[in-house]
Image (tube, rainbow, N blue to C red):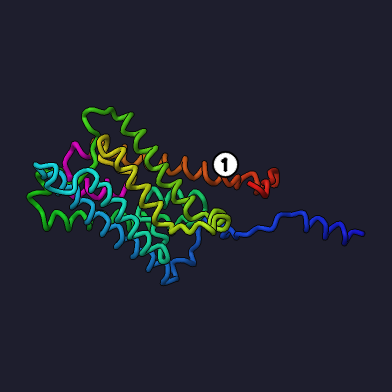
């Protein structure tokens, strides 16, 4: 009798067509003994260096134009950022996860996708890569670099700091939420009939956010991008606004992690055993 009841209970449980990876440990000292860990950190460094090199050089080329048709224009700047993220995430996803952004790393850490040790190592590598990337730009285009703002992020005089902060929070939310959605094993399993290359929506998110917020802040949504440009340019007006490009992205990443993990996926409630999802959802 009890065996029959047990079999009926198992039959009534929905069969999961996806597997969630186990949560990353908070501290994982064993990572420090693995070459794959250092390879991933190097990949984050190189990817962020290339990202800043291409994008900052594009920004400077856009700012030095006198004729709207002379260079890529605002649309081209947005494409440079979105396109580079698409290329670099595609190239490094299998090695490091393709973060290239401290805010993305922070959001994934909050969701237990990476350990604290890996998150810190990635962020340090991203910051150093950004500094080196912008340094190369200054080295090959020094006059243009100095004359056209060094590709730094600052708040436009026509907008308040509060508006700029809100733009950074919302823009980063869009990006990090897209990262979570594009890499969600549950979505990938249930929408397997719709093949989606994860770097594509992530790159498009970056592109669209840039179109919306370049006039406000030059679009940060990536503390490494803002910090690297500020360090090499190193003039006071840039540092006055720098906090916005750290606080905004980290708050946006926090909001995206909470929304995806604890509302859409109901992770905390499931862990407490107080919530059951509808198989049809």
Most frequent secondary structure within the magenta stretch: helix
Position in image of residue 251 (x %, y %) = 42, 39
- Residue at figure coordinates x 20%, y 54% from the top left: 134
Position in image of residue 116 (x %, y %) = 46, 55
Q: Which residue is mark 1?
A: 263
Magenta stretch containing residue 219, yes or no?
no
In-image side of 138 versus 115 (left or right)? left
Position in image of residue 14 (x %, y %) = 71, 54
Q: Quadrant of residue 2?
A: bottom right
Q: Vertically, is 47 above or below 105?
A: below
Q: Quadrant of the N terminus?
A: bottom right
Residue located farthest toward the front when viewing the structure as drawn? 193
The image shows a total of numbered marks equal to: 1
Q: Vertically, is 207 above or below 167?
A: below
Which sits in the foreground, 275 or 17? Answer: 17
- Number of residues whose C-alpha sits closer than 10 Å to that of mark 1, classed few (under 14), some (14–19) or many (20 or more): few
- Residue at figure coordinates x 56%, y 60% from the top left: 21
**Residue 207 visible:** yes
- Residue at figure coordinates x 46%, y 42% from the top left: 254
**Residue 121 visible:** no
Which sits in the foreground, 174 or 79? Answer: 79
Position in image of residue 56 (x %, y %) = 21, 51
Magenta stretch containing residue 230, yes or no?
yes
Q: Secondary structure at mark 1?
A: helix
Q: Quadrant of residue 52?
A: bottom left
Which range is magenta? 223-238
């Amino acid at each position: 009798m009890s065996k029959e009841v047990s079999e009926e209970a198992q039959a009534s449980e929905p069969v999961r067509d996806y597997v969630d990876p186990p949560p990353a440990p908070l501290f994982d000292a064993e990572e420090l003994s693995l070459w794959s860990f250092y390879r991933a950190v190097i990949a984050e460094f190189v990817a962020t260096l290339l990202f800043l090199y291409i994008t900052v050089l594009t920004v400077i080329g856009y700012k030095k134009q006198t004729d709207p048709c002379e260079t890529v224009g605002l649309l081209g700047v947005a494409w440079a950022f979105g396109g580079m993220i698409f290329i670099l995430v595609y190239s490094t996803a299998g090695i490091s996860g393709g973060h290239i952004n401290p805010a993305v790393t922070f959001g994934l850490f909050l969701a237990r996708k990476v350990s604290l040790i890996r998150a810190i190592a990635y962020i340090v590598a991203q910051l150093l890569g950004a500094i080196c990337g912008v340094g190369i730009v200054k080295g090959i285009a020094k006059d243009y670099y100095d004359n056209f703002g060094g590709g730094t992020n600052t708040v436009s005089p026509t907008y308040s700091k509060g508006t700029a902060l809100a733009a950074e929070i919302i823009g980063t939310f869009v990006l990090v939420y897209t990262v979570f959605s594009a890499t969600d094993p549950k979505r990938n399993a249930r929408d397997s009939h719709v093949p989606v290359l994860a770097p594509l929506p992530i790159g498009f998110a970056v592109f669209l956010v840039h179109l919306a917020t370049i006039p406000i802040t030059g679009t940060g949504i990536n503390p490494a991008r803002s910090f690297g440009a500020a360090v090499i340019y190193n003039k006071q007006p840039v540092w006055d606004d720098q906090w916005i490009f750290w606080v905004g992205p980290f708050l946006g990443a926090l909001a995206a992690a909470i929304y995806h993990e604890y509302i859409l996926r109901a992770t905390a409630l499931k862990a407490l055993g107080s919530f059951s999802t509808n198989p049809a959802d």
